[in-house]
Amino acid sequence: MTRLPKSPAALTCVALALAVVAAPLSVARAEEHGRPKVEITRSGVADDEVTLELSEEAWVETSTATVRLAADLAVESGSFGAARAKLEADLAGFVEGAVWRIVDFRQRGEDSGFERWRVVAEARIAESALADLPEKAKAASGPGRALSVAEVDYTPTRDEREATLAALRSALYARIAVETAALNAAFPDRTFRVRMIQLLPEGGPVMRPQMLMRSEAMASDAAAPKAAGLAGAEKAILTASVVLAASVEQGEKSE
């Protein structure tokens, strides 16, 4: 005679094992007596779905550049503040309307009562005003002060990028509307709608050549006309992952 365990946990395990063994027998007996099988049907509203991936691209154009101008100063000890103020006043007259900001300054040493400083100023300047900058920097140099154009960066501004992305979004929405109308025309018994749109910018900016120009290149081409056609750009790509859906009446479809 087999003894059953007395603990509640052990009894539960035994009961579950007996139920698993008995289940196929119950189904077989039900089929023998002609009872219909139970089918699982969908409850609630289903959707027919179509997934699309659409992309648009455009160049983010700019006609301005971020200019960095470097000034190497040799000033008497303790007079750096006055030398910086004079430099800022001179920069203000370089390009009409440009706002120069000191973005870096550091002392590079001291010699015989003179301090040596490196100052870097930055401004966003129209392309048409760039050709004259090397000559203006040279003219503003003198004893104890040497100015030069350190860098010209044609990377578009944030506002220019955002304006281009807004145009790309509008173009994608128009294409989605066309796709939705085409689906409804092809399947007149369905009414498709936009269920989801996920916008995905692709990667980083793709820059055109000559978008970044150093001061040496500018100095070698100082005689070039003001509007030299060097405006830079980035390629903006926007992809939309779209789900179009049409409701199906309950009972129309079953699994």
Image (cartoon, rainbow, N blue to C red):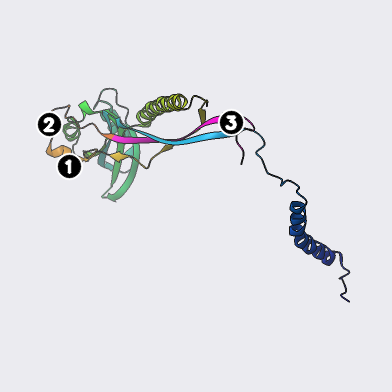
Q: Which mark is residue 248?
A: 3
Question: Is 17 on the left-hand or right-hand side of 236?
Answer: right
CA neighbours of label 2 inside 10 A, class few (<14), some (14 to 19), many (20+)? few
Q: How many marks?
A: 3
Element at badge 2?
loop
Element at badge 3?
strand
Q: Nearer the viewer, residue 122 or 138?
A: 122
What span is colored magenta in the figure?
234-255
Please report whichever mark, 2 or 1, sits nearer to the chain's N-terminal start. Answer: 1
Q: Are the residues flagged by discs 2 and 1 in contact, CB closer than 8 Å?
A: no
Question: Is 246 on the left-hand or right-hand side of 215?
Answer: right
The CA distance from mark 2 to mark 1 is: 14 Å
Residue displayed at 12% across by 31% down: 224
In what quadrant of the picture does the C terminus appear? top right
Kind of residue sitting beneath label 1? Glu
Residue 133: horizontal and vertical position, in percent? 20, 32
Q: Which residue is mark 2?
A: 224
Residue 218: horizontal and vertical position, in percent? 17, 37
Note whether 220 is above or below 62 in the view shown: below
